[in-house]
Amino acid sequence: MVSRVQLPPEIQLAQRLAGNEQVTRDRAVRKLRKYIVARTQRAADGFTHDELLKVWKGLFYCMWMQDKPLLQEELGRTISQLIHAFQTTEAQHLFLQTFWQTMNREWTGIDRLRLDKFYMLMRMVLNESLKALKMRGWEERQIEQLLELLTTEILHPSSQAPHGVKSHFIEIFLEELAKVGAEELTADQNLKFIDPFCRIAARTKDSLVLNNITRGIFETIVEQAPLAIEDLLNELDMQDDQAASDSDESSEGGSLCKAELEAGEEQAGDDRDSGGPVLQFDYEAVANRLFEMASRQSTPSQNRKRLYKVIRKLQDLAGGIFPEDEIPEKACRRLLEGRRQKKTKQQKRLLKLQLQRRKGRPGKGEKEPSSPGMERKRSRRRHVGADPEVRAEAAEQPGTAEQALLREQPRGRGQRGARQRRRVPRARARAKVPSVQEPEKKKKRRE
């Protein structure tokens, strides 16, 4: 009797994760979490690269089989939170590395109906990886390791990441970073987070990647500058109010200050809900870093031109000039100029009509006077159509009144004109006239 070969637990879990029944898949996800916790308690019993690739293949098809948006969101949150089950930083980075490698490998096989849930999964995994950094206090070494991993697997030109993965990652990076660390990260730390994008934007030869980085990172920073400064001012005001409330000793005054603080916090919360959290940047430092990368000889000219435009905007922001303030002024100027042009055009038209009426020329609604030749032709047509004697005289002059009558006859659909058809004799039926002699050539033929 042949004994059954026992498969490794990673393959067994992957098979159950890709099962047809939702109950089987949910149980497999719960067992996988327990298995990860038990396996990574000791560094010697950690996962290998190939084992995590097998696990992620099962998780990928677990997400593939899941339908209904709410269940997809719940499953995506459960899968992305598996990173916290790993006990060491190296195991977490290996888990993230195998995830992005799996997405790069399977991306071309995803149909358009399933794209949205995998976009959501990428967003959730990025969010949880940033939360893992936050739990470790935003250590500089941990930040560098995560950014190096993301650059190698997604942003670098030699990576296997398709354009869809790159574009979506660039689009969501600042948004997810702001959700996790907008309240804690400083301007210097935020500059470190966008440093890989500065290097790739100056180095890449792919115009699509350059366009996505410029729009999704640098232009987003420029657009959010007024909101970032407003948040900073609100934070300073709240600190001043808190200091004033602490120094106030009276109970009534303290209660009033407390109420004002609560109202200010509610208003700040409403602002964040409407616009979302915004990261703080040192715009001069960002401009200097971009200029350092763009001014190198190895930077392509197309990239240099595009980055120099962004650098000018950042330098203006560092000097206190906001591009958002110039847009309404330009729009108002254009609107006023358009109204003035319309008024001047209307005035010119009125003057032209007045001059034409004074000189006797018709305007747009009046008929133009006809020339004397046209008047003669019209009068001739009227006389020919009305008087039969004139019609007879006109018949003696072919090519004049007859042609005028033919033009004058109505030819509309369903109407019969007064035109008489001329009977053309057939070629064979000739009428013999006795007084007319035949030509000499025909006589010779008869002889």
Image (cartoon, grey):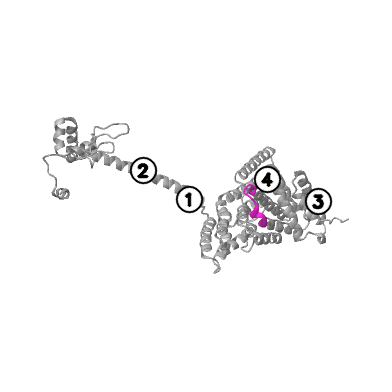
Q: Amino acid at mark 1?
A: Glu
Q: Earlier in the sequence, mark 4 or mark 2?
A: 4
Q: How far apart are the two marked residues, 2 and 3, measured between alpha carbons? A: 75 Å
Q: What segment is highlighted magenta in the picture?
A: 103-116
Give x and y (percent) for residue 163: 60, 57
Local packing at callout 3 (Cα closer than 10 Å; few below 14, some 14-19, many 20+) is few
> Circle 3 is placed at which residue position?
34
Give x and y (percent) for residue 94: 73, 59
Give x and y (percent) for residue 149: 68, 60
Q: Main secondary structure of the magenta part?
A: helix
Q: How far apart are the two marked residues, 3 and 1, measured between alpha carbons? A: 57 Å
Q: Amino acid at mark 2?
A: Lys
Q: Amino acid at mark 3?
A: Lys
- Left or right relative to 193: residue 330: left
Q: Earlier in the sequence, mark 2 or mark 3?
A: 3
Residue drawn at x 48%, y 50% as measured from the top left = 326
Helix, strand or loop under label 4: helix
Q: Earlier in the sequence, mark 4 or mark 3?
A: 3
Q: Nearer the viewer, mark 1 or mark 2?
A: 2
Q: How far apart are the two marked residues, 1 and 4, measured between alpha carbons? A: 42 Å
Local packing at callout 1 (Cα closer than 10 Å; few below 14, some 14-19, many 20+) is few
Give x and y (percent) for residue 415: 30, 31
Is 257 colored magenta in this rendering? no
Tell me whether the residue at label 1 lies in contact with that at label 2, contact meaning CB atoms closer than 8 angstroms.
no
> Circle 1 is placed at which residue position?
326
Tell me whether the residue at label 4 lies in contact with that at label 2, contact meaning CB atoms closer than 8 angstroms.
no
Q: Nearer the viewer, mark 3 or mark 1?
A: 3
Helix, strand or loop under label 1: helix
